[in-house]
Amino acid sequence: MADDYVIEIDSLSKRFKQKVAVDAISLSVPKGSIFGFLGPNGAGKTTTIRMLLGLIFPDSGSARVLSREVPRGLREVLPKVGAMIEGPGFVPYLSGLQNVKRLLAAAHVTGAEADRLAMSALERVGLAKVANLSAKRYSLGMKQRLSLAWAVALPRELYILDEPTNGLDPAGMREVREIVVNLAKEGSTIFLSSHLLSEVDQICTDVALMSQGRIIKSGPMETLKEDQVGYLEVVVDSPERARDLIGAWYPDLSVFVGPDSSTIRLAVGQDDDFAGKLNYRLVTEGVTVSGLRFSGRTLEDIFVRYVGEGFDVS
């Protein structure tokens, strides 16, 4: 049902001269989800977000945000959306606090209430100590935090966050992830674009994989991982002998020696009972097992499976 989704995109396209930036994508974002919009830089994520917020118009297709068609219904939609978009337009000579209050004034929040909400937002993103410093003196990471403070200054039904951890150090990235999770716990839906696999993998409930302007795969994170073929990696002292034994015991399994020449990989799902039994059989046959682990079900594995290439996975 439409009420179950906060964003619905149908065959949305955008071209810039000869380049197709977004190529007839369709996508539904479930209400209450932390939705990861994942793809390498240049995949078309920011262009899609700009169309959702009415900053640019699509060439074809349609989109609905909070059950309203955009851009036609943006007047009703935007007050319910907190947005953080690449390249925020700060006033450089104003302080961080003044910049957030300026945004609140546009939402008709002024006076003591604006002071309270602005400081609360800056505290939430770790900028309280530099609230009165002019924005032109902020580092890239501080500007990114200020942009996030803009987005979360008022409670919203939907937060659209474009690369929210760009320019942040690992500690800052962790803080942003915590903010996103807390916003979701408070009842909001989060639509988060990123080129960082690990960022999306840690917090998102749903994901769409985008490459070269197209949606390659989308769905609940758990379902995508369950559908992904996994591997059991066994580290042994005699890989050739272990491979022969496993091949004889389990002729239907694909078994091969890994690139480090001491690891056997088996194409199996995660099954702790199977791993334990295999370990026992190998040891009984005199093969020393120094490690057992399941792999192949990370978001990186899923992306490579469907797209055929990787990207920044830091």
Image: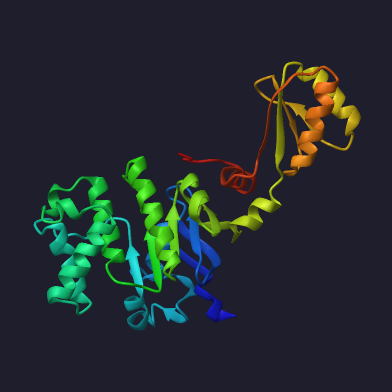
| Quadrant position of the C terminus in the picture | top left
Give the x, y percent position of residue 205: 54, 59
The quadrant in which residue 117 appears is: bottom left
Which residue sits at x=82%, y=34%?
Answer: 277
Q: Is residue 124 above or below residue 201?
A: below
Q: How is the image coloured?
A: rainbow
The quadrant in which residue 17 appears is: bottom left
* Residue 226 appears left or right of 219: right
Instruction: Determine the residue located farthest toward the left in the rendered image.
Output: 93
Give the x, y percent position of residue 143: 23, 52
Which residue sits at x=65%, y=21%?
Answer: 260
Q: Is residue 251 above or below residue 195?
A: above
The mark tally for this picture is 0
Give the x, y percent position of residue 218: 59, 60
Which residue sits at x=53%, y=74%?
Answer: 5
Which residue sits at x=63%, y=56%?
Answer: 222
| Quadrant position of the N terminus in the picture | bottom right
Residue 112 visible within the image: yes
Residue 15 visible within the image: no
Viewer-nearest residue: 79 or 46: 79
Give the x, y percent position of residue 82: 34, 68
